[in-house]
Amino acid sequence: MKNILFTIIFTAISFHENGTPRKIIVYSVNFFTRTIIAIPCEKFSANFRGIVDTSEVSAEGSIKKLDKFLEEIKYSKDSIHIDTRAKFVFINKLGTEMEICMDVFNISINGRLIGNFPAFHGFLRSLVPPNQLLLHPKKVIK
């Protein structure tokens, strides 16, 4: 009986209030992709059309961790623009869609640069497919 109750509670936590499962959608290109100009978050999909790798993370641990990180965010007063190589779309526990973008060094949330937060940067990098973080990704031959 305890196992059934735990399973019901555990499953309920990973769903948003409207009954849809919560997930993190990751859009990424190879972090070493060169461009003539920096690619802002809002133009990421248009500029990298056809080469964006899309994946979804629905692991409860990852969702809880992202919720926790978002509670601890401190925004930077700097106004630099990042050269986006990964974009994360996430519905937070309040039901608000969040757009998180990152380059090799910086992260922005809904267009606002965050302060130095190495643990958060490392967590987001762990969600990006490993081949997107390699200097020379291996070519897959099928």
Image (cartoon, rainbow, N blue to C red):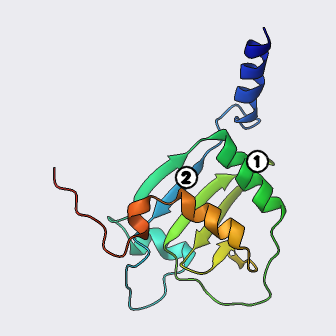
Looking at the rendering, which quadrant does residue 2 occupy? top right
Q: Nearer the viewer, residue 2 or 109?
A: 2
Residue found 74% across the figure and 90% down from its top: 78
Q: What is the x, y in percent for residue 55?
A: 47, 51
Residue found 75% across the figure and 34% down from its top: 13
- Mark 1 residue element: loop
Tell me if 6 is positioned left or right of 21 in this view: right
Q: Which mark is residue 25?
A: 2
Query: Which residue is under mark 1?
Result: 95
Q: Quadrant of the N terminus?
A: top right
Q: Could you tell me the amino acid type at mark 1?
A: Gly
Q: Which mark is residue 44?
A: none
**Nearer to us: label 2 or label 1:** 2
Residue found 76% across the figure and 53% down from its top: 67
Above or below — where is 40 with respect to 18?
Answer: below
- Mark 2 residue element: strand
Q: Is residue 96 visible?
A: no
Q: What is the x, y in percent for residue 57?
A: 56, 47
Q: Is residue 23 visible?
A: yes
Q: What is the x, y in percent for residue 43?
A: 49, 75
Above or below — where is 54 with respect to 12?
Answer: below
Tell me if 75 is positioned left or right of 47 in this view: right
Q: Earlier in the sequence, mark 2 or mark 1?
A: 2
